[in-house]
Image (spheres, rainbow, N blue to C red):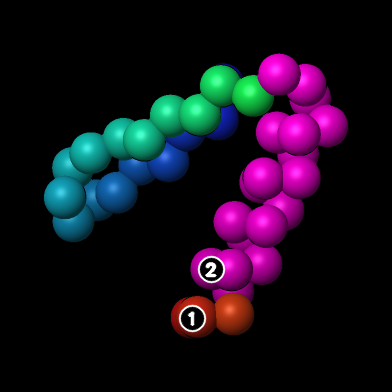
Amino acid sequence: MFSLQFDRYESTIGFKLSTYRAAKCLWKIAVEHHAFFR
């Protein structure tokens, strides 16, 4: 399970992916997206 927590809104979003590889890919994309818009 992959989850995100937002301090400002105090909410958590969870994702359940079928494979470890898919979860790792989603995590990498999220980190790159965050770094780009920072």
Distance of label 1 from label 2 (alpha carbons): 6 Å
Report helix, strand or loop for mark 2. helix
Residue shown at the point (72%, 53%) measured from the top left: 28
* x and y percentages locating residue 25 in the rendered image: 76, 45
- Would you say the residues marked 1 and 2 are in contact, meaning their CB atoms lie under 8 Å apart? yes
Residue named by callout 1: 38
- Amino acid under disc 1: Arg
Q: Which quadrant holds residue 8?
A: bottom left
Badge 1 marks a residue whose secondary structure is loop
Q: Quadrant of residue 30?
A: bottom right
- Numbered badge on residue 5: none
The residue carrying mark 2 is 34
Residue 30 left/right relative to 29 = left
Instruction: Identify the residue at horizontal 76%, vertical 34% (top origin).
Output: 22
**Which residue type does callout 2 highlight?**
His
Residue 11 lies in quadrant = top left
| Pick the front one: 38 or 15 | 15
Specify the segment rendered in magenta. Answer: 18-35
Above or below — where is 37 with respect to 27?
below
Task: Find the residue positioned furthest to the left.
Answer: 9
Q: Residue furthest right?
A: 21
